[in-house]
Amino acid sequence: MKINPTKIGSNDRFSDDYLFQQIQNGQHEAMEQFFNRYYTRLCRFGQGYESDYCLVEEKVADVFIELWNNRNILDKIRNPKSYIYVIVKNNLKKSQKFEQFHQQIDETKVIHAMSIPSIEVEIIDMEQKEINKNIIREILDVIPRKSRQVFELSRIDGLKYKEISEILGVTPKTVENHITLALKHISKALKSYDKGEIINTIY
């Protein structure tokens, strides 16, 4: 199946469960809408496990192809959103490059590698476009890798704590602790800037 990333219609028109039902029935348009809804988010999420963006894109695309090829069992999936995030995570963790990346690069370099302009752009688009992207980037860079990942899933992707815990294989309390830690780092970083409007954007 050829997946066309071109956006068609409204990605927020139908629920994930409804799209899964339609995909199971062989509806290509539903597959395309589900792809458009999650492809970019999953690629960003995948970079928490793999630094090679081309490889991340390949693995994410494979997930959608696998989803289509196994559409006959989609009725067994209770939470489509959590399901695809977990599949992406597992696929990337199995890759040899992920192992090498994790062994050779320390925590500081991982955080630097995750400084992706698209993350800041998304925050700005959602909240306040006039905010300086460089300031947002510097603030996000102070957050430890795992806490930043949890923070992005919560504040950018809009996932609930329970969904994040299922995706990352941790308890909801651990997710809450990561959010608290991230906000603590952000609050500390905000003291360096005399821009009160940034607080509303981050929080």
Image (cartoon, rainbow, N blue to C red):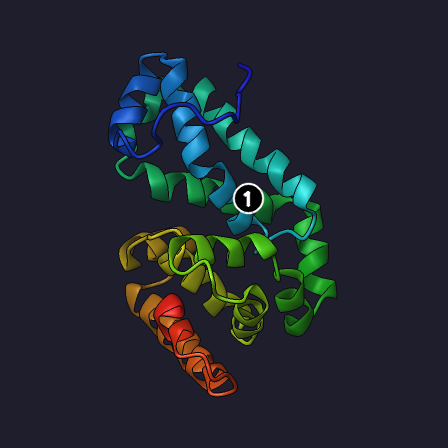
Residue 84 position within the rendered picture, expressed as x and y whole percent measured from the top left: 42, 38
Nearer-the-camera pick, 35 or 171? 35
| Image quarter of residue 77 | top left
Residue located at (45% from left, 30% from top): 35
Q: Residue beneath label 1, please?
A: 43
Residue 196 position within the rendered picture, expressed as x and y whole percent measured from the top left: 39, 79
Residue 187 position within the rendered picture, expressed as x and y whole percent measured from the top left: 42, 82
Number of marks in picture: 1
> Which secondary structure lies at badge 1?
helix
Residue located at (71% from left, 66% from top): 105
Work out which residue is located at the far front of the displayed protein and give it: 130
Residue 94 position within the rendered picture, expressed as x and y whole percent measured from the top left: 60, 45
Mark 1 neighbour class, 10 Å CA radius: few under 14, some 14 to 19, many 20 or more = many
Quarter of the figure with the C terminus: bottom left
Nearer-the-camera pick, 127 or 96? 127
Residue located at (61% from left, 60% from top): 114
| Image quarter of residue 91 | top right
- Residue type at tag 1: Cys
Residue 201 in view, yes or no:
yes
Residue located at (42% from left, 72% from top): 198
Residue 169 in view, yes or no:
no
Above or below — where is 2 with respect to 43? above
Above or below — where is 97 with respect to 19? below
